[in-house]
Image (tube, rainbow, N blue to C red):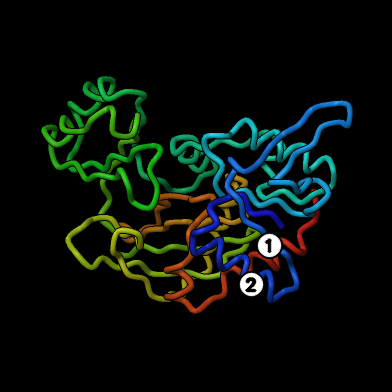
Amino acid sequence: MLVIGLPELYESRRLRSEGRGLGWRVDVAPFDRLAFEVGAGGRRAFCGRRDLFREYDTLYFRYFHPYVSEALLLAESAARRGLRVIDRTLASSNFVQSKMYNYWKLSEAGLPVPAGFQVMNLALAKPRLAGARWPLVAKGVHGSKGRYVFRLDSPAAARQLNDDLVGFFTFQEYLPAEAEYRVLVIGGRSVGAMLKRQTSDDFRRNIAVGAVGEAATLPRPLSRLCEKAARTLGYEFAGVDLAVTGGRPCIFEVNRSPGFQGFEQATGLNVARLFLNYAAKRKTR
């Protein structure tokens, strides 16, 4: 397996380590280590000196921005040659990375998501914010792990946002949560849940910004909601942020390449091995 991502991350190290335990060779490389070639010998792709189509039987795309077009090309070409490509949607050129796209598709599928809107620059937000009910949550569309997520308590707070910070924003209703969970879904099946607890007055419950996690058991209907969310977006390894707000479930976010350090520590689950076992058994198409 070639994992396309950052070798120094915990998740990359865990996949390599568990791969060795399973008798796999798991390599990790950032996308800028790849090269493409078109010539008399055909079309080839390389990681260093390794021919990707000859050396690997599985490509797992974790992080590849800003090389989206090249990633789609590689995924499609690898799948045509019989390699497993995770996620399948990459190989079909049907991949989209957008918070609003995700909320739109989840809503179309009948799944509960926060009400909100997205703008391409902050000037367009002003007339919409004029009649808004406060507080609101602003999410920079390129943020992750709680970065560029702000609670706005007033129009004055909204005016302090800077277009240069992250480009553009999704604005959502603020929903106070009685409980918020991270649920991991692998191959369309929920493998475990973690309750996220705040340790400060920060409204965000991201492990990356100081929240703590503990193992949790979700009722089956809530697990099925998370499984449907992952399937709707075509994510084979997904981290679903599910909240209970006002006594009802709401999907706050679905992450395509979730971190799982805090999840493994809180739950004791071997997430890396669960994913590798799934990848080994998955059909190439």
User: In screen coordinates, is 157 left or right of 204?
Assistant: left
Q: Is residue 93 above or below residue 252?
A: above
Reading the image, the residue beneath label 1 is 26
Q: Is residue 244 above or below residue 83?
A: below
Q: Is residue 259 above or below residue 263?
A: above
User: In screen coordinates, is 164 left or right of 280?
Assistant: left
Instruction: Tell me the quarter of the image containing the N terminus.
Output: bottom right
| Residues packed near mark 1 inside 10 Å, few (<14), some (14 to 19) or many (20 plus) | many
For marks 2 and 1, give the CA distance.
9 Å
Viewer-proximal residue, 114 or 92? Answer: 92
Q: Position of residue 67 (x, y in %)?
A: 57, 34
Reading the image, the residue beneath label 2 is 18
Viewer-proximal residue, 50 or 277? Answer: 50
> Is residue 222 among what the camera can see?
no
| Residues tagged 2 and 1 counted as in contact (Cβ below 8 A) | yes
Q: Position of residue 199 (x, y in %)?
A: 23, 68
Amino acid at circle 1 = Val
Q: Please tell me which residue is depicted at 37% across the width and 58% down the height of the picture.
A: 243
For numbered disc 2, what is the local secondary structure? Answer: helix
Q: Position of residue 4 (x, y in %)?
A: 61, 49
For numbered disc 1, what is the local secondary structure? Answer: loop
Total numbered circles: 2
Q: Please tell me which residue is depicted at 45% across the width and 69% down the height of the picture.
A: 263
Q: Please tell me which residue is depicted at 48% across the width and 36% down the height of the picture.
A: 98
Q: Quadrant of residue 75?
A: top right
Amino acid at circle 2 = Glu
Q: Is residue 174 above or below residue 213?
A: above
Q: Position of residue 215 (x, y in %)?
A: 43, 76
Answer with mark 2 or mark 1, whichever residue precedes in sequence.
2
Q: Please tell me which residue is depicted at 62% across the width and 63% down the height of the picture.
A: 189
> Is residue 170 among what the camera can see?
yes
| Residues packed near mark 2 inside 10 Å, few (<14), some (14 to 19) or many (20 plus) | many
